[in-house]
C-alpha cells in the first residue's frame, strides 16, 4: 500500500498557552483545549477558556471545527475531532487538512489511531515526547475517498459497539449500588432503623503477619491492595505470585480462608473484595470472616459505604491507617439474613451479566484492533461487522 507524508495532506499547527500570571488572558471567551479535556472521539468542550485579548496578544491560531487534534507530549496519541472552533495548548497538534476531497477527517483520525509512534518518540528526561519535526515524519495510506468512507463506516460500527458495551457495564455497576440502597436504605443514616452491632460481634478477623515473605514459590496467592477487585472477587495477585505452606509458616503468616471479606486499612481506605480462594494478605489489608448471621456480600457492600467513618477514625501519620481495633469496632447494621441473602443473589445475577458483557467487550476490542490493522494495510474492503 502506498504511503503519503502527512505534510502533503495537512498543515500541522501547534497550540499555545498564554501566561498564567496574566489574569486578563483567562476567563470567558474561547474554548482552550488541554490533554485533560480529551478522551472522547469528538471534542467540543474544555475546562478553561481564553479571552479575546489572549488570542490577539499571544497570536494564538484557531483550530477550525472538524479538525483532527492529537496530544504529542507525555501522553502521546490521544485523539479527537473538534466539533467547534477552539484553541489548544502547546501539547496538542492540530492536523488541518488541505483538501477534504482527498482526505476525510475521520479517516485521518483512524489512521493516527492505528499508527505506531514508537520509532518517532524522543525519550526525554521528563518522559516520552514528540515535536513538530517528528510529527512531520508520519506517513499514512492515502486511498480513494469511496474506500475511506467504507473504512470509516466499518470502524464506526466497531467503535459504537465498544461504547455500547461500556455503557452497559457502567449501568449494571450503578444498578448494584441502587439495589443495595433500595433494599437496606442509606447505610450512614440507617433510615430503615436496622439493629446495629460492632462487626466483631458477628465476624471473626484474621490479621496479617508483620513480616513479609522473602520468597514466593508456591500457589497460595499473595494479595495486596493493588490486587483487589473492588466490590468483586479476588482470586490472585496481578503479578501471579504465591506462597508455599512452608514459606507462610516461616514468617508466621496466616492463611485467609476463601469467602473472607478483604478490606484496605492503610492509605486508600475502604476498598473491599471477597477472597475467591484461600490466600495470604499483606499488612495493608484487614480481613473478616462473617458468621452465619452476616452475609459476606452484604458486608462487602455495607463497608464500601463506610469510607467517611474510616477516614474519621483512622490514625493519620504519613497515610491514613486503621488498626485491628478500629476495624473490628466498626458498626454494621444487621437486617434479617434472608434479606441479606436475597441481596447477595441479586448481586451474583448482575455480576454474571457483567462478566458476559465484559467478555464481549474484550472480544470487540480485539476485533477493533484487528480492523484498524487491516484497514491501514490494504486488507479491509470486504469486512463486515455484525451489530
Image: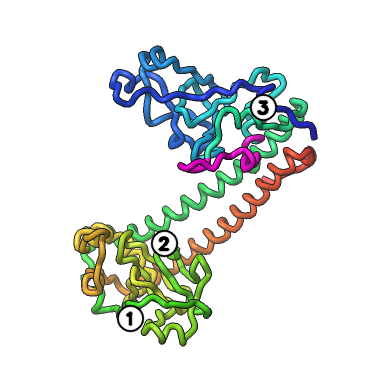
Residue 375 found in image quarter: top right
Which residue is labeled 2 in the image?
A: 230
* CA–CA distance in space, label 3 to label 2: 44 Å
* CA–CA distance in space, label 2 to label 1: 22 Å
Do tag 3 and tag 2 residues touch (Cβ < 8 Å)? no
Q: Residues within 10 Å of mark 3 (few under 14, many from 20)?
A: many
Which residue is labeled 1 in the image?
A: 291
Residue 27: in sight, yes or no?
Answer: yes
User: Taking 200 as reference, is 234 above or below it?
Assistant: above
Does label 2 or label 1 sit earlier along the sequence?
A: 2
Do tag 2 and tag 1 residues touch (Cβ < 8 Å)? no
Please give left or right for residue 291 compared with residue 137 in the image.
left
User: Taking 172 as reference, is 235 above or below it?
Assistant: below
* CA–CA distance in space, label 3 to label 1: 66 Å
Position of residue 27 measured from the top left corner of the image (x, y, whole percent): 32, 22
**What residue range appears in magenta?**
111-128
Please give left or right for residue 327 compared with residue 353 in the image.
left
Which residue is labeled 3 in the image?
A: 6
Does label 3 or label 1 sit earlier along the sequence?
A: 3
Amino acid at each position: 500500500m502506498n504511503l503519503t507524508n502527512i505534510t502533503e495532506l495537512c498543515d500541522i499547527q501547534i497550540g499555545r498557552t498564554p501566561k498564567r500570571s496574566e489574569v486578563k488572558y483567562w476567563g470567558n471567551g474561547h474554548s482552550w483545549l488541554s490533554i485533560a479535556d480529551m478522551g472522547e472521539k469528538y471534542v467540543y468542550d474544555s475546562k478553561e477558556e481564553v479571552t479575546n485579548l489572549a488570542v490577539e496578544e499571544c497570536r494564538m491560531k484557531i483550530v477550525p471545527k472538524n479538525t483532527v487534534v492529537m496530544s504529542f507530549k507525555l501522553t502521546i496519541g490521544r485523539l479527537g475531532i473538534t466539533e467547534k472552533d477552539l484553541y489548544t495548548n502547546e501539547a496538542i497538534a492540530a492536523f488541518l487538512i488541505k483538501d477534504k476531497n482527498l482526505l476525510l477527517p475521520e479517516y485521518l483520525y483512524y489512521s493516527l489511531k492505528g499508527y505506531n509512534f514508537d520509532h518517532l518518540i524522543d525519550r526525554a528526561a521528563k518522559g516520552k515526547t514528540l515535536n513538530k519535526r517528528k510529527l512531520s515524519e508520519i506517513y499514512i495510506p492515502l486511498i480513494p475517498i469511496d474506500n475511506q468512507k467504507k473504512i470509516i463506516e466499518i470502524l464506526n460500527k466497531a467503535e459504537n459497539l465498544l461504547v455500547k458495551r461500556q455503557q452497559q457495564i457502567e449501568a449494571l455497576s450503578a444498578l448494584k449500588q441502587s439495589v443495595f440502597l433500595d433494599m437496606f436504605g442509606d447505610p450512614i443514616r440507617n433510615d430503615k432503623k436496622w439493629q446495629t452491632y460492632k462487626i466483631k460481634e458477628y465476624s471473626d478477623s484474621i490479621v496479617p503477619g508483620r513480616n513479609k515473605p522473602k520468597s514466593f514459590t508456591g500457589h497460595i496467592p499473595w494479595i495486596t491492595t493493588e490486587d483487589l477487585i473492588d466490590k468483586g472477587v479476588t482470586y490472585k495477585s496481578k503479578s501471579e505470585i504465591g506462597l508455599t505452606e512452608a514459606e507462610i509458616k516461616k514468617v508466621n503468616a496466616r492463611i485467609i480462608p476463601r469467602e473472607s471479606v478483604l478490606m484496605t486499612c492503610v492509605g486508600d481506605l475502604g476498598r473491599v473484595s471477597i477472597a475467591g480462594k484461600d490466600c495470604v494478605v499483606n499488612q495493608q489489608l484487614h480481613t473478616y470472616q462473617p458468621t452465619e448471621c452476616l452475609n459476606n456480600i452484604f458486608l462487602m457492600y455495607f463497608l464500601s459505604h463506610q469510607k467517611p467513618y474510616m477516614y474519621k477514625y483512622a490514625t493519620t501519620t504519613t497515610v491514613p491507617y486503621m488498626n485491628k481495633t478500629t476495624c473490628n469496632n466498626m458498626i454494621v447494621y444487621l437486617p434479617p439474613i434472608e434479606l441479606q441473602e436475597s441481596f447477595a443473589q441479586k448481586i451474583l445475577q448482575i455480576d454474571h451479566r457483567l462478566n458476559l458483557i465484559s467478555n464481549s467487550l474484550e472480544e470487540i476490542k480485539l476485533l477493533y484492533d484487528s480492523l484498524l490493522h487491516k484497514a491501514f494495510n490494504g486488507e479491509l474492503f470486504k469486512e463486515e461487522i455484525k451489530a
